[in-house]
C-alpha cells in the first residue's frame, strides 16, 4: 500500500507557469495511493490542459461552477467535505489574496472556503511579487487561519530573474502531505494543557500592568495538538482573538493569580504541559476601587509584589511520566538564561526566542526559536510562521516524551 492509500486530496491549480509541475505532483500523489480531484482556476487552463490532468487523475477536472452544455452543478461544499487534504500548487499572488480575504469568485476559492480538513499552499510568482508586503500579509493571514505554507524556493524564475519565488518541488510537497497524515493521529488519547497570552494586573478599574503578548504562539500550539488528536485545554489571559476550533477547551482568566489557580487544575492530569503565557512577574500590592486621579499629584508610586511562579508550582505536582515545556523570551545572554530557567523551574524542555530577532516574539505571525531539552538536546530553527513553529515544537515534545517513558 502507498503512503497515501485511500486519502482524498483536492489539488488546486492556479494560473502560473509553475502549473506544469502540477502534473508531476498529481502523478506522485496517485502513485502513493491517493484519490485526487483536480480543481483549476480558469486561467490555469492557459498553462496546462484539463485533458492532461484528467488522464492522470482518472477524474474529470472541475473548473466552473456548472457544466455549460448540461447545467450540471459542481458542489464546492461536497468537495470540501470529501477532501482529507487540499493542496493549492501553484498558488499565485491573486489566489492567495482571494483565499486570505474570502473572495469566492471561482470554484477553487469556494472549495477552499468549504474545506473541513487541512489546507496547504505552495506559492509561485516572481521575486518582487513574493516579497511584496501584500503577499506577505496574505500569507501571514492564511498561516494564522491554519493553512500550511510551503515556502517558495530560490532559483531562476519565468522572468529570468534569480530569487525566491519558485514553487517547491513536487517531491517536497508530497513529503509534506505524507508528514501531515502521519502526524494526524499521533496524539490520540493524550491530554495537553497550555497557558496562553498575557496577564493583566489591575491598578484601578481602568489601568493595569501587562505586556504585548498576543497569544498567537500558544494558540498555534493548541491548534497543532488538537489537530493531531489530543484533548487540549488552554488557560488564556486577555487576548484580542481566540482560535475558532471548538475542540480546544478555553478557560479565560485575567491575572497571574487566576492563571495560577486554573493552571494547577488543568496541568494536574495533563500528559503534556506547555507554559506559553507571558505571565507578569509582579502585581500592584493594592488595588483602588476608584479611578486614581492625577490632579494635585506630580507622581504616582505603585508598590509591586511578586506573582506566583506558575511553572514551578505546577512542576511540584507533576504527573508521573508527563513532560513540561517552558518558554523563554530573552534580550541578553539568551542561551545561558534559558538553561538556568530550565533547571530552576524543573522543566523537561524550554523554547527560547529573542526580542533581538526580527520577526520573533510578541505580536508577530512568525517566530524564530531554539528548543533545548534537559537531556542536552538543542536545535535552532529558522524564522517560520507560528503554526509551523508549533509543529516543530510538538514533534520534539513527542520525541522527548518517548525518551522519558523508556527511562
Image: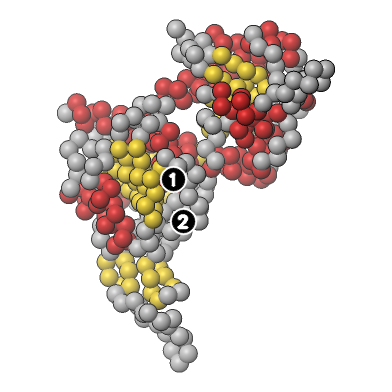
Q: What's the residue at 43%, 59% (across, down)?
A: 238
Residue 348 place in picture, x, y as percent: 25, 40
In this view, 255 is above or below 127: below
Q: Which mark is residue 219?
A: 1
Residue 91 is situated, as x and y percent measured from the top left of the image, at 66, 29
Crowding at mark 2 (Cα within 10 Å: few <14, some 14-19, many 20+): some
Residue displayed at 29% across by 43% down: 273
Task: Find out whether the residues at labels 2 and 1 contact each other: C-beta distance under 8 Å.
Answer: yes
Q: Is residue 100 visible?
A: yes
**Which x, y percent locates residue 271?**
26, 37
Residue 50 position (above or below residue 202): above
Does 285 appear above or below 141? below
For marks 2 and 1 on the same chain, the one whose residue lies earlier in the sequence: 1
Kindly give the residue lying farthest to the bottom in the view shown.
Answer: 296
* Quadrant containing the N terminus in the rendered view: top left
Report whether 150 appears left or right of 362. right
Q: Is residue 235 left or right of residue 20?
A: left
Q: Quadrant of residue 71?
A: top right
Give the image's coloring scheme: secondary structure
Q: Quadrant of residue 160?
A: top right
Query: Where is mark 2, residue-wise?
Result: 239
Q: Which quadrant of the view contains residue 279?
A: bottom left
Residue drawn at 74 percent across, 35 percent down? 105
- Residue 350 in sight in this render: no
Amino acid at each position: 500500500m502507498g503512503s497515501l492509500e485511500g486519502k482524498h486530496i483536492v489539488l488546486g491549480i492556479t494560473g502560473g507557469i509553475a502549473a506544469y509541475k502540477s502534473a508531476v505532483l498529481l502523478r506522485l500523489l496517485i502513485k502513493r495511493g491517493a484519490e485526487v480531484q483536480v480543481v483549476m482556476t480558469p486561467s490555469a487552463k492557459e498553462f496546462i490542459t484539463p485533458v492532461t490532468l484528467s488522464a492522470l487523475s482518472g477524474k474529470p477536472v472541475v473548473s466552473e461552477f456548472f457544466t455549460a452544455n448540461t447545467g450540471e452543478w459542481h458542489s464546492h461544499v461536497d468537495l470540501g467535505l470529501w477532501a482529507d487534504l487540499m493542496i493549492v500548487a501553484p498558488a499565485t499572488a491573486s489566489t492567495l489574496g482571494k483565499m486570505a480575504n474570502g473572495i469566492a469568485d471561482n470554484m477553487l476559492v469556494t472549495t477552499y472556503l468549504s474545506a473541513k480538513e487541512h489546507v496547504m499552499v505552495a506559492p509561485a510568482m516572481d521575486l518582487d511579487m513574493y516579497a511584496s508586503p501584500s503577499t506577505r500579509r496574505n500569507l501571514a493571514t492564511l498561516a494564522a487561519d491554519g493553512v500550511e505554507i510551503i515556502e517558495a524556493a530560490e532559483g531562476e524564475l519565468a522572468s529570468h530573474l534569480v530569487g525566491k519565488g519558485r514553487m517547491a518541488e513536487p517531491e517536497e510537497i508530497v513529503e509534506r502531505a505524507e508528514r501531515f497524515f502521519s502526524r494526524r493521529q499521533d496524539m490520540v488519547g493524550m491530554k495537553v494543557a497550555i497557558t496562553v497570552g498575557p496577564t493583566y494586573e489591575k491598578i484601578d478599574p481602568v489601568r493595569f500592568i501587562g505586556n504585548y503578548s498576543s497569544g498567537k504562539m500558544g494558540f498555534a500550539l493548541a491548534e497543532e495538538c488538537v489537530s493531531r488528536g489530543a484533548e487540549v485545554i488552554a488557560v488564556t489571559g486577555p487576548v484580542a482573538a481566540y482560535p475558532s476550533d471548538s475542540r480546544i477547551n478555553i478557560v479565560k482568566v485575567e491575572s497571574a493569580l487566576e492563571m495560577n489557580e486554573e493552571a494547577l487544575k488543568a496541568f494536574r492530569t495533563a500528559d503534556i504541559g506547555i507554559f506559553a503565557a507571558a505571565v507578569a512577574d509582579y502585581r500592584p500590592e493594592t488595588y483602588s476601587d476608584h479611578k486614581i486621579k492625577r490632579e494635585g499629584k506630580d507622581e504616582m508610586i505603585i508598590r509591586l509584589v511578586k506573582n506566583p511562579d506558575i511553572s514551578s508550582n505546577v512542576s511540584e505536582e507533576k504527573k508521573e511520566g508527563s513532560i513540561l515545556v517552558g518558554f523563554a523570551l530573552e534580550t541578553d545572554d539568551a542561551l545561558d538564561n534559558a538553561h538556568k530557567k530550565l533547571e530552576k523551574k524543573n522543566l523537561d524542555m524550554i523554547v527560547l526566542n529573542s526580542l533581538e530577532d526580527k520577526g520573533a516574539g510578541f505580536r508577530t505571525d512568525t517566530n524564530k526559536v531554539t528548543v533545548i531539552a534537559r537531556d542536552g538536546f538543542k536545535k535552532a530553527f529558522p524564522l517560520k510562521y507560528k503554526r509551523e513553529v508549533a509543529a516543530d515544537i510538538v514533534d520534539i515534545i513527542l520525541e522527548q516524551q518517548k525518551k522519558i517513558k523508556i527511562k
